[in-house]
Image (cartoon, rainbow, N blue to C red):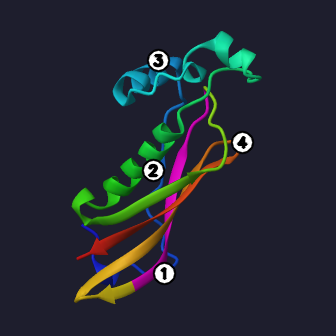
Amino acid sequence: MPKAADWNIGDELPVMKTEPLTRHALALYCGASGDHNPIHVDYDYAKEAGLDDVIAHGMLSMGYLGKMLTNWIPQKQIRSYKARFTAITHIGETVCCSGRIAKKWEEDGRWLVKIELFADTPKAQSIIGEAEVFLD
């Protein structure tokens, strides 16, 4: 479990990289999330929408960012987590999730850090976000 004394502004969290995204993974995510928008699973629909192929759910990449965060710290220590989608994630791309400590402060006797979060594909930064977490 991360200790406050061990983490400072500018420190980077352990990076998490996904396997290349597959149609199968998107279909499974449709079922798990309830997001059955055909742009994520129907090739013809995606082509009609002007895309080369189906695209990944933005929330899937946000979930990967959350997984990277909880690989580092228990979920119960996350005070807040938010993100903004900035680019499309395509079939076959990997998502590289990373974070860096942007702020550290003490509040009511507990240490907190603000973490800048990033989800990058080989072509673009698909998500930027932030989280505030309590450290021990």
Is 76 magenta? The answer is: no
Q: CA distance from mark 1 to mark 2?
A: 20 Å
Q: Secondary structure at mark 2?
A: helix
Identify the residue position indicated by label 3 in the image: 24
Q: Quadrant of the N terminus?
A: bottom left
Direction right: furthest residue: 50
Q: For mark 2, what is the residue?
A: 65
Q: CA distance from mark 2 to mark 3?
A: 20 Å
Residue 56, position as x, y percentages in the image: 56, 31
Disc 3/disc 4 C-alpha distance (Å): 22 Å
Q: Which mark is residue 92?
A: none
> Which SS class for mark 3?
helix
Looking at marks 4 and 1 on the same chain, the residue that comes earlier in the sequence is marked by 1
Name the residue rendered at 47%, 81% in the picture.
103
Q: Could you tell me the amino acid type at mark 4?
A: Lys
Q: Is residue 93 magenta?
A: yes
Is there CB contact under 8 Å for labels 2 and 3?
no
- Of helix, strand and loop, which one carries label 4? loop
Residue at the image point whose x is 61% and y is 33% from the top:
93
Predominant secondary structure in magenta?
strand
The amino acid type found where label 2 is placed reads: Leu
Q: Which residues are magenta?
A: 92-104
- As drawn, the label of residue 123 is 4
Residue 112 lies in quadrant: bottom left
Q: Residues within 10 Å of mark 1 (few under 14, many from 20)?
A: few
Q: Which residue is mark 1?
A: 9
